[in-house]
Image (cartoon, helix red, strand yellow):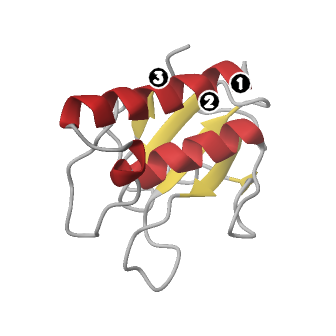
């Protein structure tokens, strides 16, 4: 399943590159001033790369990646402790981890949530097989 997910992500990047008339590597990471997502999920390229890392179980850049997310804000469905895990989505130009994260649910992950504002709001990302 992880291989299929990875192939889907790579295909989406290649298709987007073809449609835009550029090389696939031109779609990865963009300058901080660019807000135009170039993928089927409507996410910044760094988020797509983080999704790939989550599916491959790393390696992760930050020691907090993969740790328990406690859902203290209660914005996500209530689940038992340990169900949710958090992962950093790098922010170009940021001196620290930035505000962008993925929160996954399940082991292996069965649900994915993305936040751009450090847990103030979430958007569910439906991973397409």
Earlier residue among tags 3 and 2: 2
Q: Which residue is more in the foreground, 50 or 6?
A: 6
| Residue matched to label 3 | 126
Q: Secondary structure at mark 1?
A: helix
Q: Quadrant of the rendered structure where residue 30 is? A: bottom left
Q: Quadrant of the N terminus?
A: top right
Left or right: where does residue 43 sit relative to residue 113? Answer: left
Please determine whether, in this image, residue 96 is positioned above or below residue 89.
below
Q: Which residue is more in the foreground, 43 or 84?
A: 43
Distance, label 1 to label 3, CA atoms, is 17 Å
- Point out residue 67 in the picture as x, y percentages from the top left corner: 75, 57
Distance, label 3 to label 2, CA atoms, is 14 Å
Distance, label 1 to label 2, CA atoms, is 5 Å
Left or right: where does residue 48 sit relative to residue 92? Answer: right
| Residue matched to label 2 | 6
Please determine whether, in this image, residue 63 is positioned above or below residue 8.
below
Q: Which residue is more in the foreground, 104 or 21?
A: 21
Q: Residue at x 35, y 43 (%)?
A: 43
Q: Badge 1: how crowded within 10 Å, few (<14), some, or many (20+)?
A: few
Q: Secondary structure at mark 3?
A: loop
Residue 38 visible, this angle: yes
- Point out residue 53 in the picture as x, y percentages from the top left corner: 66, 46
| Residue matched to label 1 | 3
Q: Quick check: marks 1 and 2 in contact, CB under 8 Å?
A: yes
- Point out residue 34 in the picture as x, y percentages from the top left corner: 21, 61
Q: Residue at x 40, y 54 (%)?
A: 28
- Point out residue 128 in the picture as x, y percentages from the top left corner: 49, 17
Give the label on residue 63, or none: none
């Amino acid at each position: 399943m992880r291989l299929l997910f990875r192939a889907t992500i790579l295909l989406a990047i290649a298709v987007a590159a073809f449609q835009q008339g550029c090389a696939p590597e031109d779609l990865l990471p963009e300058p901080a001033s660019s807000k135009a997502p170039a993928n089927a999920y409507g996410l910044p390229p760094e988020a797509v790369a983080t999704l790939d890392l989550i599916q491959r179980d790393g390696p992760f850049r930050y020691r907090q990646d993969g740790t328990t997310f406690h859902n203290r804000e209660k914005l996500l469905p209530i689940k038992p402790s340990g169900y949710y895990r958090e992962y950093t989505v790098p922010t170009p130009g940021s001196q620290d981890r930035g505000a962008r994260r993925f929160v996954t649910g399940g082991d292996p992950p069965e649900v994915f949530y993305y936040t751009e504002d450090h847990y103030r709001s979430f958007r569910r990302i439906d991973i397409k097989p």
